[in-house]
Image: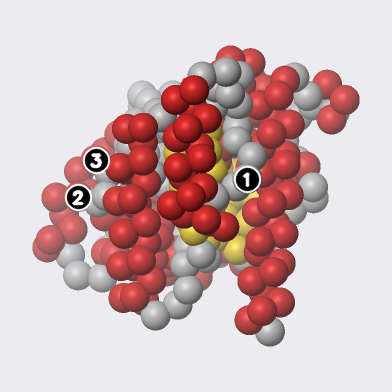
Amino acid sequence: MRVWAIANQKGGVGKTTTTLALGRGLAMRGFRVLLIDLDPHSSLSRAFGVPADPPPSGVMELFNPEGAELAPLVRATEIENLSFVAAQTSLATLERRSATQPGLGLALSSALARGGQAYDYVLFDCPPTLGLLMVNALAAADRVIIPTQTEPLAMHGLTGMCRTTDMIERSRQRPLPVSILPTLHDKRTRTGNETLRQMQEQHGARVWEDAIPNDTRICNVDVLTQSMPPAQYPGRGLSAYRRALDWLLASERGELEQAA
Ligand SMILES: Nc1ncnc2c1ncn2[C@@H]1O[C@H](COP(=O)(O)OP(=O)(O)O)[C@@H](O)[C@H]1O
Ligand SMILES: [Mg+2]
């Protein structure tokens, strides 16, 4: 089992889209994939048609003091090999509980130890806040993928995220490789291209050399949540995500070989 956290403290940068597109891509390559929605806004769960009301079963149960089993919370999707665990709006209350409940920072790591072996890849769709949920995801992760919009304001968020991952890496004493995915890129604008260049200059090999283009066809969640023969892939967005996945898998192979 490999665990990827898709995280950025900024909202609207493409975290959920990236989680869906990479998860779908991995599943279509034959890997058994579990997506875990950690955002109280539950965009990923909504994309798969889970209503907010009545509150679904999901991630919240993994934070019960007795620690629920993962398997009963897992939902199948239309895509073979792709399942997910839904988020609940009540996840927002977790941050308040954290102070009084020791060990809560490792709740997701221990949940994966109780059932994650059934999957080749587990992807966390993180909320846009550096709180208990994101810390849990980063603590459990083998890799963090940071989708970052190619616009000047996003660069500050990126620096903050890298600081956070460095801190987690030091405290857990296990490497946490970072992959930065430029998203929502408009190559026709000077600002977009300049920001991409700065990102590459400041963060070097951590940054994907290409970028996910701004492509409105990807906003139609059906594109990401339904299975479709490769010949029918609509648009540049999805094909860019396929190339991004190639890069991520190659980085991972390189790291595993180095560690061996
Ligand atoms: N490459 C893209 N091109 C165009 N729109 C996109 C792209 N990626 C994401 N979006 C849209 O931008 C919005 C924010 O994306 P989302 O994945 O929900 O970000 P986050 O999870 O970081 O808040 C959504 O409406 C989504 O459909
Ligand atoms: Mg999201």
Quadrant of res 83:
top right
Mark 3 or 1, nearer chain start: 3
Name the residue at 46% across, 44% down: 199
Q: Position of 6 compared to 107: left or right?
A: right
Label 1 CB-ligand 1 distance < 8 A: no
Q: Position of residue 25 (x, y in %)?
A: 71, 41
* Image depth: mark 3 or mark 1 in front: 1
Between 47 and 188, the one nearer to me in the picture? 188
Depicted 180 relative to depicted 175: above or below:
above
- Under circle 3, the secondary element is helix
Reading the image, the residue beneath label 1 is 209
Reading the image, the residue beneath label 2 is 95
Q: Position of residue 203 (x, y in %)?
A: 46, 54
For label 1, the crowd category at 10 Å Cα-Cα, with few meaning under 14, some 14 to 19 and many 20 or more, is some
Reading the image, the residue beneath label 3 is 92
Q: Position of 103 compared to 138: left or right?
A: left
Q: Amino acid at mark 3?
A: Ala
Gap between marks 3 and 1, in whole Å?
35 Å
For label 2, the crowd category at 10 Å Cα-Cα, with few meaning under 14, some 14 to 19 and many 20 or more, is few
Q: Amino acid at mark 1?
A: Glu
